[in-house]
Amino acid sequence: MTVVMQARGVSKVFGATHALRDVDFSVRRGRVTALFGENGAGKSTLMKILAGIEPPTTGELELDGETVTLSSPREAADRGIVIIHQELSLFPNLSIADNLFVARERRRRGVLVDFKEQRDVAASLLERLEEPLDARTLVADLRLGQQQVVEIARALAQDARVLIMDEPTSALSTAEVEVLFRVMRELTASGVSIVYISHHLEEALEIADDAVVVRDGQIVAEAEAAKIDLKWIVENMVGRNPDSLFPDEHGEIGAELLRVTGLQVPDPGNPGRLAVDDVSFSVRAGEVVGLYGLMGAGRTELLETLAGRLDAVAGRIEVDGEPIGAGDIADRIALGIALVPEDRQRDGLVQPMSVGQNLSLAGLRRFVRGPLVSRGAEREAVEAMMTDVTVKAAGPDAPITSLSGGNQQKVVLGKALLTEPRVLLLDEPTRGIDVGAKADIFELITGLAKRGLAVLFATSEIEEALHVPDRLLVLSRGRVVRELGRGSASREEIMLASEGIDRAEVST
């Protein structure tokens, strides 16, 4: 339990904001330390200080018992401290191998880049992570989960002594998480220290040796992971019982708003395969219908087809009993269908824009008066929406990049709502946000259903699948394999169905 790295009395001030207050934090050799806390609690700020991205305002860092000053991430990496960021930092126009070694190229004779060696090392790392990809593949051609694996492989390529992992599994499938955990245990067995941040509390508790909770910039609780449970984590994070996080009231079910019949959609990455295969279902006003499935089950492709981003090759989509033909996203928005995408950074937000500009972007036609946009009406609607979805920001003019992940997600949700939808499609709306922000999102979903919206909600988290929707559709390999009512299914039944296994097969 030797301490490899330590923060002593670290504080960080941004203007009038105290992100960290007198924090003492230790990283022990060969152990996984899970760091828990809500968005804005100070977790990422502390990790950026450890990784040399931000200097502390006061306090100091120690490495192997000696005080160090880390002036840059490169210096930290040279000392064996590597970070995997929550938001991907890959170059989409470069190959996997090039991304793994960018700014750290392997050279022959000190001059020429050894591309073959880089491809060989990349292939070895991908094999270790059980991801069957060609190292020459462009990152732009990978799905989100595969890009996350590449980000992890890049960190492994740096032979870290201290590996900081900020939400490394937010886009990974269950199988990919299991592989990552195996690799993490191999690393700790060889003496590598890991700091692990995740909003998947059960998952983090499974892999952790030690648990630390941060709240309002201070460490409020520490314990060995084997001696605590989820209730201990949640109560220290947000000060309330975890049972209160899911909605217990639901809207009154009304008339059918959306019907899908025999829908077939090709896989965008492999047109010879169907990502959605003969799917049929309906959603009523006031109803929340859940879609649960593993990575590759077809959840995202189904929602993107309904939203007009992908084209179906067969099937029928009806709104209010009227069939809708081919059309783009703007056409579907005009029909009252809006999508909150899975990847908020790539598909949901425009980074150079302000909070208000992002919120009004999709619904801008509402504020057109003749040839001009009524800025007064736009701002009034934006301010009202910020209140409705509880966005914590300095105001509509605040940069979108100044918000925490949870508040950015609320902006993406608010943007969809400003289009005045009747059918709301939510693709992993709680990905990468903390437990408190998740509770806010669930409350918003329930409130929208009570107002008469039809909500189709995709998730890869079992607890959400069990507690949030009125009905749950389980997808496997592009097909709906099970339909379950609230309270009528167990975790085991949902997981087996998502793997395409009938419970009767297991019992026999």
Image: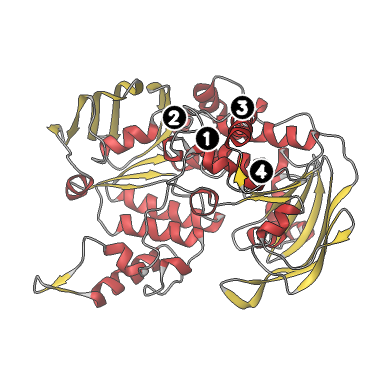
Say what amino acid the circle numbered 3 marks: Thr
Q: Which mark is residue 40?
A: 2
The structure residue drawn at horizontal position 36% and vertical position 22%, both measured from the top left corner, is 17
Please give the residue where the numbered disc 3 appears in the rendered image.
387
Q: Residue 401 location in percent, x, y?
A: 42, 40
Is 236 left or right of 320, judged from the image as shown?
left
Number of numbered discs overlaid on the protein picture: 4
Q: Residues within 10 Å of mark 2 (few under 14, many from 20)?
A: some
Mark 3 and mark 1 lie on one chain; the one further toward the N terminus is 3
Please give the residue where the numbered disc 4 appears in the rendered image.
369
Instruction: Decide which of 388, 226 is in the foreground and name it.
Output: 388
Label 4 with label 3: CB-CB less than 8 Å: no
Instruction: Decide which of 153, 414 is in the foreground and name it.
Output: 414
Mark 4 and mark 2 lie on one chain; the one further toward the N terminus is 2
Q: Mark 3 to mark 2: distance in Å?
A: 19 Å
Mark 1 and mark 4 lie on one chain; the one further toward the N terminus is 4
Q: Mark 4 to mark 2: distance in Å?
A: 39 Å
Task: In the displayed orientation, state which residue is furthest to the bottom.
Answer: 272
Please give the residue where the numbered disc 1 appears in the rendered image.
407
**Quick check: 450 above or below 349?**
above
Label 2 with label 1: CB-CB less than 8 Å: yes
Q: Residues within 10 Å of mark 3 (few under 14, many from 20)?
A: few
Say what amino acid the circle numbered 4 marks: Arg
